[in-house]
Amino acid sequence: MSNLRLVTIDRLPVMPDRFVPDSFEPPRALDGPGFRLEPLGPQHNERDHEAWMSSIEHIRSTPGFPDGDWPSPMPPERNLEDLERHARDFETRRGFTYSILDGDDVIGCLYIYPPEHEGHDAEVSSWVIESRAELDTVVWSVVTEWLSEAWPFRSPYYATRG
């Protein structure tokens, strides 16, 4: 026999298995004034890539994107990997990313993920392309109300506008 012994650890940090309760069904759409939301996925790749690549500096100056590191230029293939990850997160309920659309045009994105800010139960951020900047406050206002009415969060963090 070796000198190994079994050690029992009483306390380990435990992360919740789910970001939202099992009983909660995440909305698959939201129609707002001048836009609609649908879950982001690989089908949006070309339009999503074009949207954020056209508005990098504008997105970096949007409330909720304070570090100035994202977005950074990348090829469409790398963007597709990100979209596939966001779609997996949605299906596994680890986070929820929506494409902000006007007709078939991607004009922005909305992210709902576990919180980074203490005292909050969700971290929410959104951006719109520079040519549709007037919708930023509209999206923020509509989504803020939607979060309080249709989601199980009590205290989401979503950087204020205007």
Image (cartoon, rainbow, N blue to C red):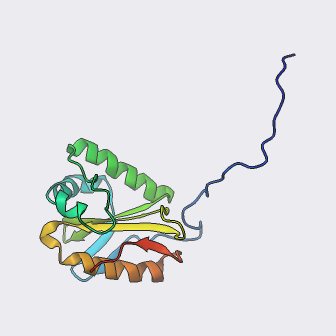
Relative horizontal placement of residue 154, taking residue 63 as reference (left or right): right
Q: Residue 77 at x, y = what percent? A: 24, 42
Q: Is residue 150 above or below residue 40?
A: below
Instruction: Classify 1 as above or below 74.
Output: above
The residue at the point 59 percent across, 68 percent down is 21
Which residue is at 40% across, 83% downward?
Answer: 145
Image quadrant assignment for residue 138: bottom left
The quadrant in which the N terminus is found is: top right
Coordinates of residue 141 in the picture (x, y in percent):
33, 82
**Residue 61, position as x, y percentages in the image:** 23, 64
- The single residue placed furthest to the front in the displayed view is 67
In the rendered view, tell whether residue 1 sits above or below residue 81.
above
The x, y position of residue 98, in whole percent, is: 34, 65
Q: Residue furthest top?
A: 1
Return the residue nearer the eye: 111 or 43.
Answer: 111
**Residue 130 falls in image quadrant:** bottom left
Quick check: 88 left or right of 57? right
Is 35 or 113 nearer to us in this picture?
113
